[in-house]
Amino acid sequence: MDDNKYVRLSGIAYESLVNGPGLRRVLFAQGCKHNCTGCFNKDTHDFDGGRLENMDDLIEDILKNPMLKGVTFSGGDPFEQADKFQYIAKRLKKAGLNIWCYTGYKFEFILENMNMRKGWSDLINHIDIIVDGKFEQNNHDSSLKFKGSSNQRIINVKESLKYEKAKVLATA
């Protein structure tokens, strides 16, 4: 098996309305180093868990659904497999889909390290919106839209890269 063609996922939400605007496909990355207290997705932390999925098959299946407005990468943490998720994001962006990504890493940390970590630069450059920061149980607020705790930020990536500073959206 050619490992370069596969991404390790914990699961897929085929049609979601809660992981970004519009009808979306959600790919849940397997593997996370953050271990946030109260994480709702602890089964995604083990880097050897989940299952391998062929990236081209995932992309083809996504593109078959004309109702989808975008794709969201969640987790686990997609930045732990950035080289895989950038491949998917690049193809989906080319097809006109909107890309959101959830990560426990702060946007500033990604900027500082994007040229030193495999796939980070390509991934960040193909994401429209990033929701950054670890989930913090003491800041949990179920009334928040598209994020789990008040410390997390919803960031316009294109504007942020242009100014090399996080451009936080008041609302998504």
Image (spheres, rainbow, N blue to C red):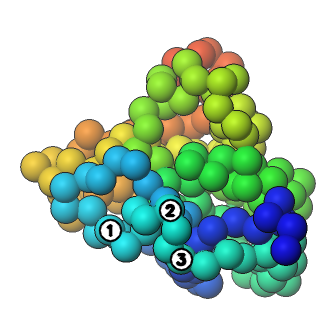
Numbered tag placed on residue 149 in the rendering: none
Q: Residue beneath label 1, please?
A: 42
Q: Which mark is residue 50?
A: 3
**Mark 2: which amino acid?**
Phe
Amino acid type at image mark 1 = Lys
The residue under the point 57% across, 54% down is 78
Q: Residue furthest left?
A: 138
Q: Nearer the viewer, residue 140 or 36?
A: 36
Q: Do callouts 2 and 1 mark residues in contact (Cβ within 8 Å)?
A: no
Q: Secondary structure at mark 3?
A: loop
Distance from the alpha carbon under mark 3 to that under mark 2: 8 Å
In terms of depth relative to the viewer, which is nearer, 35 or 89?
Answer: 35
Q: Residue at x 35, y 55 (%)?
A: 147
Q: Residue at x 73, y 55 (%)?
A: 84
Let me know if residue 24 appears in the view: no
Mark positioned earlier in the residue sequence (2 or 1): 1
The kind of residue on which mark 3 rests is: Gly
